[in-house]
Image: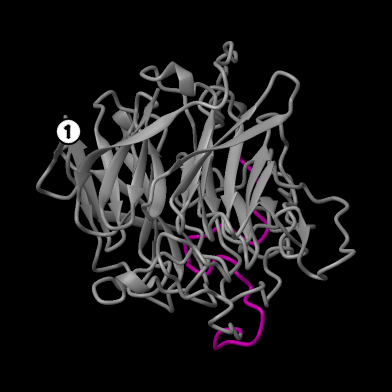
């Protein structure tokens, strides 16, 4: 899955891409062309934590009621007409592969941009600061597809604690996924690279489908999206194996913990019927997900195999445990077997599109900014290959409305949200765009 136009000068091709697409933006080598035999190790990986700083096999939940932040979602306002009209306004070009943009929610209005090579850069008052906020390129393996420093998440109350987390592919081991905690230094624009503490390590049997995003939910817990382990078709059946940590959405309590504990509200906290870290399963490669900052609802952009890309949805009222269907289902369609598959118990996507429209979904955000009221309540997401951007919104009757909003012509590696709720689109090559509503 190497994007051909980057072969001369990029070694990180963004391993999100699904199979068999003829798309107008960028020629790709698809998964179906790379006849994916399972990677070197034939036995199914346990995908359990492999680093020493992990909970015991049967963790005892210790979350007190006061440990869980309480939030009161803002009532949904009257929604504007749908669909809205959008355009993209160029901001800065970092001229290096970028895959994530976020903020610290500390009142500084700074924007933090993640470079796959292992650096985090700061944009302050529209200017790129010369010194990286964090540089752990010595720890990060970014040479393979879908590898690198993939995302970061600032802990709630960062303005007091100075604690944040990163998700990266480790040079140690064999490309393992690492979740690590870091602290800011005395300089608010520079983190302490020696403060790193590994929270969780997950063995990866292949170099693609690493997932890569981490984000704190409105409940104060850390959510981790993990891919199914790579190759094609989930040959190790990780996504539907509830004891594996791959092909999942994990939920961890990291506040005040040396590594992490299991939230007592997790659907399988005792570990008897699933790994206790599991919040939801049946995902192929949830490259980007987000919480609606007004309602707390969770949106997941899950990259498909050879035919369908999908958006999965979880209401803020959910108690977890959803099965999103992979690899029995691809989108809302049977994958294995190709017909008459058993779908009972799985949650269908709220939207899917076939590979005439693109080949690799990039999940986005529900717009909750103030600058463009016409976008209010609309979930914006796109496709890496075709550059198309869609809008998705639930109407007053609970039905999902969808519309193609823009053919951007760029390789969309991620969407991003600043402290004010304004949205951005990232081109893998380094260009940052702001979403403009009309």
Q: Is residue 14 left or right of residue 116?
A: right
Instruction: Tell me if residue 63 can be seen.
Output: no
Q: Residue at x 31, y 29 (%)?
A: 160
The stretch drawn in magenta includes residue 325: no
Q: Which residue is mark 1?
A: 126
Which colour assignment does the render follow?
one colour
Q: Is residue 252 left or right of residue 121?
A: right
Nearest to the observer: residue 378 or residue 45: 378
Q: Residue at x 67, y 68 (%)?
A: 238
Instruction: Tell me if residue 256 can be seen.
Output: yes
Q: Residue at x 60, y 51 (%)?
A: 250
Image coordinates of residue 140 in percent, x first then y, are: 31, 67
Image coordinates of residue 100 in percent, x first then y, are: 36, 48
Q: How many marks?
A: 1
Secondary structure at badge 1 equals loop
Image coordinates of residue 348 in percent, x first then y, are: 76, 47
Decide: few, some or many residues near mark 1? Use Cα within 10 Å; few <14, some 14-19, many ≥20.
Answer: few
Q: Quadrant of residue 234?
A: bottom right
Eyeballing the image, is 434 above or below 32?
Answer: above
Q: Residue at x 56, y 18 (%)?
A: 81
Q: Which quarter of the image is occupied by the C terminus?
A: top left
Given the current orientation, which residue lies at the most extreme left position?
130
Eyeballing the image, is 31 above or below 289?
Answer: below
Nearest to the observer: residue 295 or residue 139: 295
- Residue segment shown in magenta: 38-62
Eyeballing the image, is 350 above or below 78?
Answer: below
Image coordinates of residue 184 in percent, x first then y, are: 24, 42
């Amino acid at each position: 899955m190497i994007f051909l136009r980057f072969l001369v000068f990029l070694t990180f091709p963004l391993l999100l891409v699904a199979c068999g697409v003829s798309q107008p933006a960028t020629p790709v080598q698809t998964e179906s062309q790379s006849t994916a035999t399972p990677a070197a190790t034939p036995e199914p990986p346990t995908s359990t934590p492999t680093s020493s700083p992990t909970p015991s096999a049967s963790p005892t939940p210790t979350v007190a009621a006061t440990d869980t932040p309480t939030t009161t979602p803002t009532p949904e306002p009257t929604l504007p007409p749908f669909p809205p009209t959008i355009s993209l306004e160029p901001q800065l070009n970092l001229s290096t592969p970028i895959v994530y943009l976020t903020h610290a929610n500390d009142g500084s209005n700074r924007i933090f941009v993640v470079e796959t090579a292992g650096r985090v850069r700061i944009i302050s008052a529209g200017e790129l600061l010369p010194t990286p906020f964090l540089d752990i390129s010595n720890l990060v393996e970014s040479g393979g597809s879908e590898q690198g420093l993939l995302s970061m998440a600032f802990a709630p109350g960062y303005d007091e604690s100075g604690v944040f987390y990163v998700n990266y592919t480790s040079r140690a081991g064999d490309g393992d996924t690492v979740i690590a905690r870091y602290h800011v230094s005395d300089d608010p624009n520079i983190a302490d690279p020696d403060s790193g503490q590994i929270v969780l390590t997950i063995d990866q049997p292949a170099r693609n489908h690493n997932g890569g995003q981490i984000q704190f939910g409105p409940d104060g817990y850390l959510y981790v999206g993990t891919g199914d382990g790579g190759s094609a078709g989930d040959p190790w059946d990780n996504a539907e194996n509830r004891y594996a940590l791959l092909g999942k959405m994990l939920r961890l309590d990291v506040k005040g913990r040396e590594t992490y504990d299991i939230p007592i509200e997790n659907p399988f906290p005792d570990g008897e019927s699933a790994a206790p870290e599991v919040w939801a399963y049946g995902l192929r490669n949830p490259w980007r997900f987000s919480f609606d900052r007004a309602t707390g609802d969770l949106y997941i952009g899950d990259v498909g195999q050879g035919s369908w890309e999908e958006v999965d949805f979880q209401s803020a009222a959910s108690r977890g445990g959803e099965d999103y269907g992979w690899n029995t289902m691809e989108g809302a369609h049977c994958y294995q077997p190709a017909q008459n598959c058993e779908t009972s118990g799985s949650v269908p996507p709220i939207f899917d599109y076939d590979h005439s429209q693109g080949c690799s979904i990039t999940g986005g955000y529900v717009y909750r900014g103030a600058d463009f009221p016409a976008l209010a309540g609309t979930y914006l997401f796109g496709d890496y290959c075709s550059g198309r951007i869609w809008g998705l919104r639930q109407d007053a009757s609970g039905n999902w409305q969808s519309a193609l909003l823009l053919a951007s012509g760029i390789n969309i590696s991620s969407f991003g949200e600043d402290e004010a709720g304004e949205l951005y689109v990232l081109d893998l090559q380094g260009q940052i765009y702001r979403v403009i509503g009309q």
